[in-house]
Image (cartoon, grey):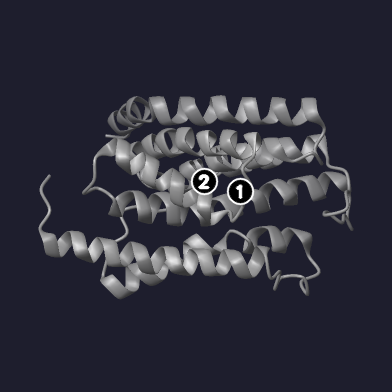
Amino acid sequence: MRFSQKSVNNKIFAIIVFYSIAILLRYLTSKINILKSIDSSFLQIVLQGIGPAIGALVAFKLFGIKLSYSLAGKLKPFLLSLIIFVIIPVIGFAIIGVHESKNLKITTNPFIASAKLSFFYIIYSILEEIGWRAFLQEQLTFVNKYVKILLIATLWFVWHLNFALTTSNFIFFLILVFASWGIGKIGDITKSIMAVGVFHAFYNLISIGNFPTEGKYFVLSFSAVIWILYITFYDKVNKKFMNVKK
């Protein structure tokens, strides 16, 4: 697909606005820590990921960009996608429970807290994905697909504001490159913010030390299998369902 210079310029300016807002809010929430007055650890988690979503929504509005994604995307009905992508993993984490740490204060039953923590991390990831996939990936259609993956991964890495020259950071960057490719493919197939959000949340949730190790591996592995099967066979199942309905 060929794009006019005006169209490309419009996309570039939109990306600059999006990323400036995303970076600014990330700095305010993670470095300045304007969220410290908020008592809820869970709400703090969500608000740290709000920058890409706010940046994307502002850019959509300012530049008249039409959002091609929705919560369920092509994976309708919405309720079924909600059950598959959100309810199943949240129930799984509710079963295994969670323990308190320095950064996580639990004021309720540990099983309810575990469900809340997993749910809030999914919301956090969905907010990020409104920026990285629903906006940025869609706006970078004028560049080579491999360049697009590297650009998204680089901007995503810089957004975390962690520039230490360490092996772990290099590995993290490679993970973001792989995620930009993998989650990007899921986005292209489904146009679902929930779908890309939960695959993003997979990494975040598996990195949290508050959950029992074996329990979280089982819940996430089981959930990921369900997600992949649902996405892979959605068209076949949907067509059969529609034929039966007729």
Residue designated by label 2: 197
Instruction: Identify the image quadrant of the N terminus.
Output: top left
Q: What element carries label 1?
A: helix
The amino acid type found where label 2 is placed reads: Gly
Gap in Å between the C-alphas at discs 2 and 1?
7 Å
Q: Are marks 2 and 1 in contact (CB under 8 Å)?
A: yes
Give coordinates of residue 64: x percent, y percent.
26, 70
In the image, taking residue 141 as reference, residue 129 lies left or right, namely: right
Q: In this view, does 232 lie above or below 186?
A: above
Give coordinates of residue 204: x percent, y percent.
64, 42
Which residue occupies the foreground of this view, 32 or 223?
32
Name the residue: 59% across, 50% down.
163
Q: In this view, does 140 lie above or below 91?
A: below
Q: What element carries label 2?
A: helix
In the image, taking residue 62 as reference, residue 154 lies left or right, namely: right
Residue designated by label 1: 122
Name the residue: 57% across, 36% down.
170
Which residue occupies the foreground of this view, 243 or 153?
153
The amino acid type found where label 1 is placed reads: Ile
Name the residue: 30% across, 29% down.
239
